[in-house]
Each structure stands twice: as C-alpha cells, then as structure tokens.
Amino acid sequence: MLKKLAFLGLFSAISALSANYAAQAAVFNINSLDFGDGFVASGTITTDDTIGSLTSANLTNWDITVTDGVGGSGFNFTETNSGAFIQGLSTDGTQLTVLFPNGVLQFSNTS
C-alpha cells in the first residue's frame, strides 16, 4: 500500500536545512511531517536554487521516507525510484511553500 502512496502537499512550509549557493543547489529538510492516520514523512528535497515559483524541473533530488506509524512499515521516495508532480510550490531561498488550497507536492513510485 505504501509503495503506491503518493503524498500531497497539505503543508504550508518546509524548513530549510541548508543552502549551498556555491554548488547552485538548496537542500530543504522535512522534519516529521504528519499527514494524519499515522502517516509521517521525513527527509530532504533539493532544488536548483531557483527563487520564486518552482516546477518539477527545479527539483534536482529528493530522499523522503513515508512511514505508516502503526506497523513501522514505510517507503523511501528518491529521484531514482519515483516521479514528482508539483503545483503551487515556491521558495524564498529559506523555505519551501505549497500554496493552499490548490498547491500540490506529490511523489509517486515508478519502480
């Protein structure tokens, strides 16, 4: 079930872990984002350091683990095993924001 889980961005912001401007990338940390029903996401999203509105092309890497919180089972979404769909995602360089109510941040298993 979790392999088919694609989580939508119902959250308003993801705090910045670090911004590596010399490498033209920004890494954002997801700290135990609770989606309800026991589902929790954590990990990182890396962008190409674009400021403002982002598209899927601006995401250069991600490593996000979603667990069910009940049985401890989970799935790890990475750039190599999943695809990303975003709508209404932006950054000011310090945090990612998904616009509410029409914003979407979705990762789907492709393997």
Image: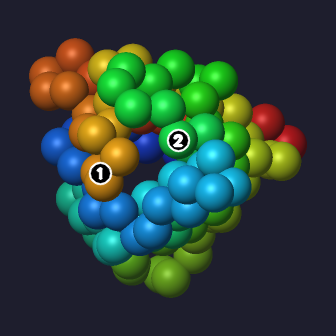
- Circle 1: element type: strand
Q: Give the number of callouts.
A: 2
Numbered mark located on residue 49 in the image: 2
Residue 89 image point, x, y percent: 35, 28
Residue type at numbered disc 1 = Gln
Q: Is residue 85 above or below residue 11?
A: above
User: Is 54 left, or right, of 32 in this rendering?
Assistant: right
Q: Is residue 54 above or below residue 47?
A: above
Q: Quadrant of residue 37?
A: bottom left
Task: Mark 1 vs mark 2: give the one in front.
Answer: 2
Residue 36 image point, x, y percent: 22, 59
Residue type at numbered disc 2 = Asp
Numbered mark located on residue 6 in the image: none
Residue at 51% across / 68% down in the picture? 43
Numbered mark located on residue 95 in the image: 1
Q: Quadrant of residue 42?
A: bottom left
Residue 2 image point, x, y percent: 58, 55
Residue at 30% across / 54% down in the picture? 94
- Circle 2: element type: loop
* Alpha carbons under labels 1 and 2: distance apart: 11 Å
Q: Quick one: quadrant of the C terminus?
A: top right
Q: Is residue 65 above or below residue 6?
A: below
Residue 49 image point, x, y percent: 53, 41
27 or 85, which lies in front?
27
Circles 1 and 2: CB atoms closer than 8 Å: no
Asked whether residue 20 is in view, the answer is yes
Q: Earlier in the sequence, mark 1 or mark 2?
A: 2
Q: Badge 1: few (under 14), some or many (20 or more) residues near its Cα, within 10 Å?
A: some
77 or 36, which lies in front?
77
